[in-house]
Amino acid sequence: MCPADSRSDLAELQAERMADASGMAGLDRRLTKLADGHPSSPRYDEDSRKADRRPLTDLEHAAHAADVKVRLADALKAGLATHFGHTIDRYHDVWSDEREAMHDSIIDDLYGKADRVPRDHRAILAGGLAGAGKTTVLTQHAGIDLRQYLMINPDQIKGELARRGMIPEVKALSPMEAAQLVHEESSHISKRLAVRAQSDGRNVIWDITMASRESTVRRIDALRTAGYTRIDAIFVDVPIETSLSRADTRHRRGHDEYEAGRGLGGRYTLPELVRAQADPDWGSINRRHFDQLKFRFDAWSRYDNSVDGRVPLLVESSRRELVT
């Protein structure tokens, strides 16, 4: 996603905070009724977290998700996003020396794990909405051996930032629930990791949504410029509502594990950002962008993974086989 797109996303997030007073009062009343051990309770603390580790009920989860949305919007409005607090230029593009050193460490660690990845100048762009199931399709249905590629995924970078304590703390939110605060930073690190891999000709998989046509084009052009002779694409298609449901399930599962003392929490996806990707003709703008750009790939395929419990269906592909 380009900087302008990201700033637009932040503006949308901030706008969501402007709810009417009666609605906010209703949410406040519901939160005060939650148990002390509930993470959205005003009385929540670490001791109560340890004392109450049961999974949330449906109503408790709904109240917690609503609270996460409010707290995250407040954090963004307060300027807690790291590209505001850890950059040194007026455009928030140049990171502080201390922060860049931490970025170097992350990139070194991730790239070090890819020392056996071939340098065949091959790439795959995997696109689709959140919760589409791209990794499952890549490994179980498209026959891609992930050991032959370096995965570049901004969401995985967010996890690395969380593990290093680099996501700002927001009361009652797990680190991954506050991951939107490092959106720009994870994008910056992902691009740096890609540049390093491309300079060596390492095989790479870009795990993206394809929500931005311009960003997708830039990635293709950068790979071609770096001498990549084979660029394939896999798009995993799901409806908007399926994406929302799976994102919510992922958030809930991760949060329950966090409350049980495992992991860094479930990543929260703002529903409005997913719904903004709807397209009346294609289902999603992501699918539209894939269809508009598929001629630029050496091979491509599209899977339908819209039905839970059903094997993803290969619905169309180019004639050449995808690289395995």
Image (cartoon, helix red, strand yellow):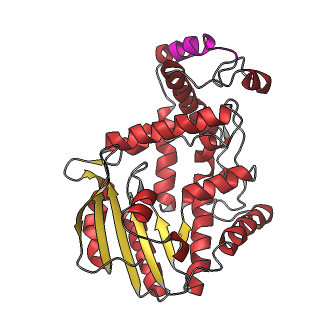
Most common secondary structure along the magenta stretch: helix
Q: Classify residue 135 as left or right of residue 298.
A: right
Residue 139 found in image quarter: bottom left
Residue 93, horizontal then vertical, whole percent: 63, 63
Q: Does the magenta segment cover residue 35?
A: yes
Residue span colored magenta: 25-36
Q: Is residue 149 visible?
A: yes
What residue is rendered at 66% in x and 73% in y?
Answer: 111
Residue 67, horizontal then vertical, whole percent: 57, 26
Residue 293 found in image quarter: bottom left
What residue is rendered at 72% in x and 17% in y?
Answer: 43
Q: Is residue 209 visible?
A: no
Q: Is residue 83 above or below residue 204?
A: above
What residue is rendered at 32% in x and 81% in y?
Answer: 298
Label total for image = 0
Q: Does the magenta segment cover residue 63?
A: no
Residue 40, horizontal then vertical, whole percent: 63, 23
